Amino acid sequence: MKTDRTSKMTEEKFELLRQLAEDGGAKGGGQALAELKAGGLLDDDGITELGLTAIEKFRVDNAIIMAAGFSARCMPLSSVMPKGLFRVKGEVLIEREIRQLKEAGVENIIIVTGYMHEKFEYLRDKYGVKLLLNQDFDKYNNMSSLYVAQNYMGNSYILSCDNYYEENIFHKYVYAPYTSSVYSEAFCDEYCITGVDGDGCITGVHRGGDRAWYTIGDAYYNRDYSETFVSIMNREWDQLSVRNMMTDDFHIAHIQDLRLRQVKRPENSIFEFDTLEEFKAFDPQFGAFMEENLDGANEVIKMFSKYAQVESYHAVPTETSFGRLHLNENLFKPSPKCLEVLKSITVEDLYLYDLSRKDELLVRLSQELSIPENNIFIHNGSAEVIKSIFSILLNEGDRVLAPVPAWSYYKSVTDAKFAQCIMYQVREGEDSYKYDMDDLMAKAKEHAPRIIVITAPHMPTGCAVDYADIEYVVQQNPDSVILIDEAYWGYGDDSNVFEKSMITKYSNVVISRTFSKLYGLAGIRIGYGLCSYPLKRAIGVDLPLHRESKISRKMAIAALDDREYYAQVKAKNMEVRDWFIEELAKIPGVKPFRSDTNFVFIKLDYADPEKVRAYMEENHILIRLFTDMGALRLRITIGPRDLMERVLFQLKKALGTL
């Protein structure tokens, strides 16, 4: 029997064999054609049995179509059917994809479903596909769909159910793993390719860009690629950050091990639809399809549609109790007296509502702060205090003025009220950040906001705010409610003189505080607000029907009683924080900023903060990234000295300075 006398199946030879195997004819030839004939892979009649054997390892095993997502941006239509079942130009999206695959000779098709999975059942009988259920579709991103389908990953097309291919781009045989890309002259918020090596493999990808090729549509993994992908995925699957990834992000994180070639597609050859407006722009008949499936007068559907673009805020989930330097919890822990409270808990504390006239925590706070009870309200943490303020005071179309960089929760609760969040600057200074009061005042004058948010001390930079500046904002904006978010109160000035003066002099000031930070009681969910009595009455409309947990309130009282312990916590935090800042400043290219809180904000001049964050996570240290004027920064919580020494050591290794 003749054998291929060439040492390697080059892409040119493969392409000739593929065309002959799939279509019976081939374009080109030359030296490659001569070598294939000489090796017995081709003869005058076409591809030989030996040729078919030679390209067998390139045969596509299957296609895995991800169809699990909810597609919130396609509400209200996605409330009645998954996006993959939308009809576009006369064809159901996923059926068109299945048909094109089968026409190309790919018969084995796996569909990973999740949301409304039962609506895909008919595809089994109609096309003989296999359905897999991703039960975590509502918790994680599309990496979880590949996790479900990992046993089927080999020579596999990896597809999304909502792509539309103008021409059939699929083949029975594929030479190497790749991802498709299309060029965009204008800016696009997509995964843009920033580098390709001599083999055509992608070496860099960045989210967002213009005059760039961005990934879209089909991807293909061969068996070697799939084996590596699955191995890394399983090794890292206990990390929630991995489960929350898109497959593109996973590729970026392991770009050296997961070598994907770039395939360039013509403009308008692949379409990806994120909103109903995009569907309508592509297909003039799509509006009629919507009318067929929606009752436009249905009030529930109207409600779905209204909230389609609103994204609720979620804290980053984590399973670990160690190395949590990303949430600004008090890692020095609460007073032992808080835990002793549990020894005195009675069964009545569990099964009876607390309906006593006097709220012991309210009384105790009044004594501690020298502020009347009528000016204090208690809630389930300061996040809930803020949410209730926004819920009561904001109307649709109102404006909120908030700092940037900042906690994204402010924007989230603003969006939920269909109001507009306008940002004013907190700017980088020589050794600390500083509120740009001129910017705040100018935007307040221009936009007449219903609420102005001031975070004191500021999160995420840790800078303090002059009380005189805050009072000036209050005086100059009598028609706005000034929300002073004091989540990190106690790490700096904790005299309460300013707060008492503000809420007695001004009716438009509300201060939010929490037991989660200084007091180390994040798990019991207790916060409180300080404001004038009329404002308290208004906010009270949105407070819980029953008081916060009686057990939690007893723990909060125990914390207030142990002043000596928390004075020590504050002193330890300051000592370690100042030492940590000093040590950070010694590292080339690292600039830490002065902080009045239990965290430090850090600028990296030369390193990639995302890679640093990933390295730290691999070493069981969780930190946060923030974007400030287009540049990334790190925020690291302060903990005991031994923990911070470990953080410093790993950070130096991540930066390559050790």
Image (tube, helix red, strand yellow):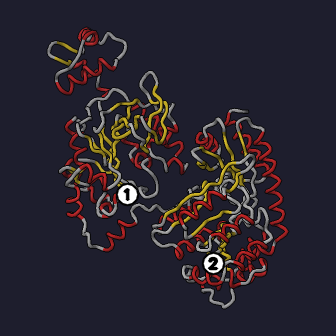
**What's the residue at 28%, 38% (across, down)?**
269
Kindly report which numbered mark, 1 or 2, lies closer to the viewer in this rendering: 1
Image quadrant occupied by the C terminus: top right
Q: Which residue is drawn at 42% across and 35% down?
A: 211
Relative to 11, residue 585 above or below:
below
* Quarter of the rendering containing residue 99: top left
> Gap between marks 1 and 2, in whole Å?
37 Å
Residue named by callout 2: 549
Q: Tell which of 502 and 94 is nearer to you.
A: 502
Residue 601, numbered circle: none
- CB atoms of marks 1 and 2 within 8 Å: no
Asked if residue 324 can be seen in this view, the reply is: no
Of residue 340 and residue 188, the one placed in the foreground of this image is 188
- Is disc 2 surrounded by few (<14), some (14 to 19) or many (20+) residues within 10 Å? some
**What x and y, as percent, mark residue 151?**
39, 42
Q: Quadrant of residue 102?
A: top left
Residue under label 1: 73
Please tell me how many numbered marks the rendered image carries.
Answer: 2
* Observer able to see residue 482: yes
